Image: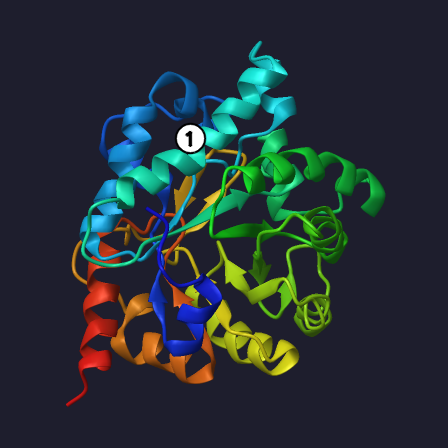
């Protein structure tokens, strides 16, 4: 069932817990994600695994589930011999699977339909560089069909996420205009700039006057970079902030592996300490969770910390 409140209304009343890295839970379930479609392959080959992964985050306390459509594109499916009609069904299924995983629990669960960047379709790490050599109009044409299909499936919000540069942000916002579903815009960043090197204040400002944008922020970045980005997103846009960084490790697109300490599970690591989460909240964060290498254990601890704050002294 769809939640009673809109997501925007819920954000006006307080913070919500996002889920973590869907791929991390799928790997924990024994799924092979070595295909170029990554987790999106399982929309066709193993939808029950995707629903189970979403359900694991629901049990952990997540209130917003991000669908398995990040790397699901018409072009990517076509390379696997999946026709356009079937690809549309799979995109719609991504929303239905998340909705089903959240059904029957005693709290509201919102579904965010993931719209990943053009670079995710290339499956070569280009989403961490941006500047693909395409115009804004070309990127808009790429994104629009998938956005229209996902919007028609009835999510609560479109997650325009892991956006590496302002050209793609502009294209995504254009493609989503008039789709009938609110959006959040979330950049992947390095320091105080987008991955393509643009100042974050300029990047966030693109969404400041967009009424359909209900939150702006960052994901798939180092938590320390999020510390600086959250207050900047809030002051630039005067909108709720969405923040879901990685565990603190770094992805090497060449070796297709993570560099740094393995901090995805185990005792709560410093990147998601109580002080940091509450500092993000004070700065304007209203959607808080994790991205790569952040699994259900981590999200459960985030949920516990935020629940304790809601309960008060």
Mark count: 1
Q: List the single residue furthest toward the top.
A: 81
Residue 222: give x, y in percent of width and height: 46, 61
Residue 148: give x, y in percent of width and height: 64, 38
Write the residue at 36% across / 76% down. 14
Write the residue at 29% across / 34% down. 51
In this view, the residue in front, 44 or 194, is: 44
Write the residue at 63% across / 30% down. 122
**Figure quadrant of the C terminus:** bottom left
Identify whether 198 is placed above or below 112: below
* Residue 3 in view, yes or no: yes
In this view, the residue in front, 97 or 203, is: 97
In this view, the residue in front, 129 or 182, is: 182
Write the residue at 50% across / 71% down. 241
- Check disc 1 and report the residue beneath it: 39
Residue 284: give x, y in percent of width and height: 47, 79
Identify whether 268 is placed above or below 82: below
Number of residues whose C-alpha sits closer than 10 Å to that of mark 1, classed few (under 14), some (14–19) or many (20 or more) = many
Q: List the single residue furthest toward the bottom.
A: 313
* Residue 34 in view, yes or no: no
């Amino acid at each position: 069932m769809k939640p009673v409140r809109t997501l925007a209304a819920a954000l006006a009343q307080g913070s919500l817990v996002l889920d973590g890295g869907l791929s991390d839970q799928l790997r924990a379930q024994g799924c092979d994600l070595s295909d170029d479609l990554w987790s999106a392959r399982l929309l066709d080959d193993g939808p029950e695994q995707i629903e189970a992964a979403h359900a694991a985050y629901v049990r952990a306390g997540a209130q917003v589930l991000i669908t398995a459509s990040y790397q699901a594109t018409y072009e990517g499916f076509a390379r696997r011999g999946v026709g356009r009609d079937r690809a549309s069904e799979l995109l719609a299924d991504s929303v239905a699977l998340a909705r089903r995983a959240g059904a029957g629990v005693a709290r509201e669960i919102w579904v965010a339909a993931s719209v990943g960047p053009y670079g995710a379709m290339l499956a070569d790490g280009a989403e961490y560089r941006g500047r693909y050599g395409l115009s804004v109009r070309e990127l808009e044409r790429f994104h629009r069909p998938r956005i229209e299909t996902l919007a028609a499936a009835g999510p609560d919000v479109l997650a325009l996420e892991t956006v590496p540069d302002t050209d793609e942000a502009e294209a995504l916002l254009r493609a989503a205009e008039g789709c009938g579903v609110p959006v959040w815009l979330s950049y992947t960043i390095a320091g105080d700039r987008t991955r393509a090197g643009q100042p974050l204040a300029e990047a966030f400002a693109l969404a400041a006057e967009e009424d359909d944008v209900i939150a702006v922020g960052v994901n798939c970045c180092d938590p320390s970079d999020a510390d600086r980005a959250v207050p900047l997103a809030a002051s630039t846009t005067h909108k709720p902030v969405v923040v879901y960084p990685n565990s603190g490790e770094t992805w090497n697109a060449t070796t297709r592996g993570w560099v740094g300490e393995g901090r995805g599970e185990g005792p709560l690591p410093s990147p998601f300490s109580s002080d940091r989460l509450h500092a993000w909240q004070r700065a304007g964060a209203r959607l808080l969770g994790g991205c790569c290498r952040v699994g259900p254990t981590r999200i459960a601890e985030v949920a516990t910390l935020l629940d304790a704050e809601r309960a008060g002294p």
